[in-house]
Image: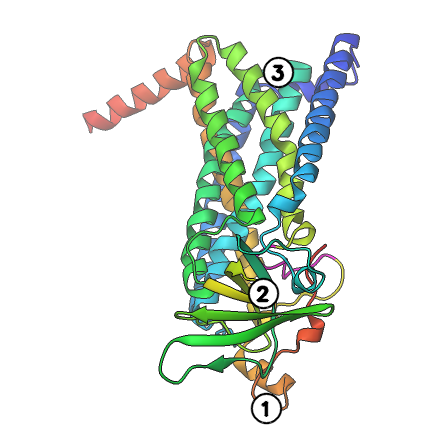
Amino acid sequence: MAWQWFHRLGSPRWFYEKSSRWLVWFAPLSIALMLVGIGWGLGFAPIDSKQGDSYRIIFIHMPAAALALAGYYIMAIAGAVGLIWKMKLPFMVMKSAAPIGAALTILTLATGSLWGHPTWGTFWEWDARNIFMLVLLFLYAGIVVLAEVYPSRDAADKACAILALVGTINVPIIYKSVDWWYSLHQPASIKLTGGSTIHSSMLYPLLVCILAYYCFYTLALILYTRREILVREARTSWVLELAQGQGKSNKAGDGL
Amino acid sequence: MHPARKQRLIVVIAIVILSSVAIGLLVYALRQNINLFYPPKAFSANEVPRNVRLRAGGCVSPGTVVRSEDSLQVVFTLVDPEGSLEVNYDGILPDLFAEGEAAVVNGQWHDDNIFYADQVLAKHDETYMPPEVAEAMNNGEKHEATCAEMSYGS
């Protein structure tokens, strides 16, 4: 009895109906925060004393990297919940998180490469941070592919969840790589303990960008999961009703 | 919690812990290869093989950068608190290369104790500040970081 509320959370229909209301908030919020954060960072924050304007890539690069790492945990935890409770929704969230995470990882690697050329003097270096970030991309890509290759959906979900769980160790390795090894990549500028080594005039737009990326990630995850729900539940009565309802309103629209 | 679910929970936790231990041991065994560069103290202690391609990294000691007048030849010394390494390089330096800043060089350490580099990379630190703030912190003098503050991870 105590776990009943938890199982209700796992219902795709419940999520689909609730998330329609969340989207109304998350869509404008994430777009507004993105415009403010990126606009402030790229247009109004002061230049860096050593790097000049090229440091501005941090406003796109660092939040993308943070969400690529955080998103991996979301994917792995969703996979674990799906494995343990055998619920449908967590597997849909897991499958939806993989392409978003892969896109963010590609964005991180691409912007880092563009910044690396003027700053370090090279587009790519086999640095610990770079290597493990590339491994993260392969893990995400592996899950995207693995979800499609199995003929049975159950088998695909289980395989993806296990791969996601095995890869979790990569996240703390990426995070601590700059402290554990001699690396070309600089350590973190924002520190949880002690003072940050980034000036407040640059820190505030960066924090807005991080918040914007979190909202955008949530929005993207909800949209992808809703799509996955409709695909997997296509034969259920509530999805058919939903589709017929929309069909009718479309026809009415055509009539006008 | 249902016994079957509890059992699956244990299996999931076991997967995470076992794979983490396995990958952790692998990374630990490869730690020497994952280091991007050798610090100057390893050169001073003679722990670095000679005449093979490798990387060295450290702080460019202020006042040691000597540029040739008729070519791109440049000589400088990389230092850390426990050692130093003389570097010879013929090429274009990255924009962020400066005295008192960190650099990573790619090349060979020859028997004459000079590191012949064919690539120089600038290693940026984690401080970001506007020029006005940097100037105020240095009391209007030209910005020149001190190597004493440098520390490299492990």
Label 3 marks a residue whose chain is A
Image quarter for residue B79?
bottom right
| Residue shown at the point (48%, 66%) measured from the top left | A55
Q: Which residue is disc 3 drawn over?
A: A87
**Residue contact at pointers 3 and 2, CB within 8 angstroms:** no
Question: Taking B4 as reference, is A98 above or below it?
Answer: below
Residue at position x 31%, y 19% from top?
A: A247
Q: Nearer the viewer, mark 3 or mark 1?
A: 1
**Total numbered labels:** 3
Q: Which residues are magenta?
A: A183-192
Which residue is under mark 2? Answer: A204
In this picture, is A252 found above or below A37? above
SS class of the residue under badge 1?
loop
Q: Amino acid at mark 2?
A: Tyr
Q: Secondary structure at mark 3?
A: loop
Q: What kind of residue is marked 3?
A: Met
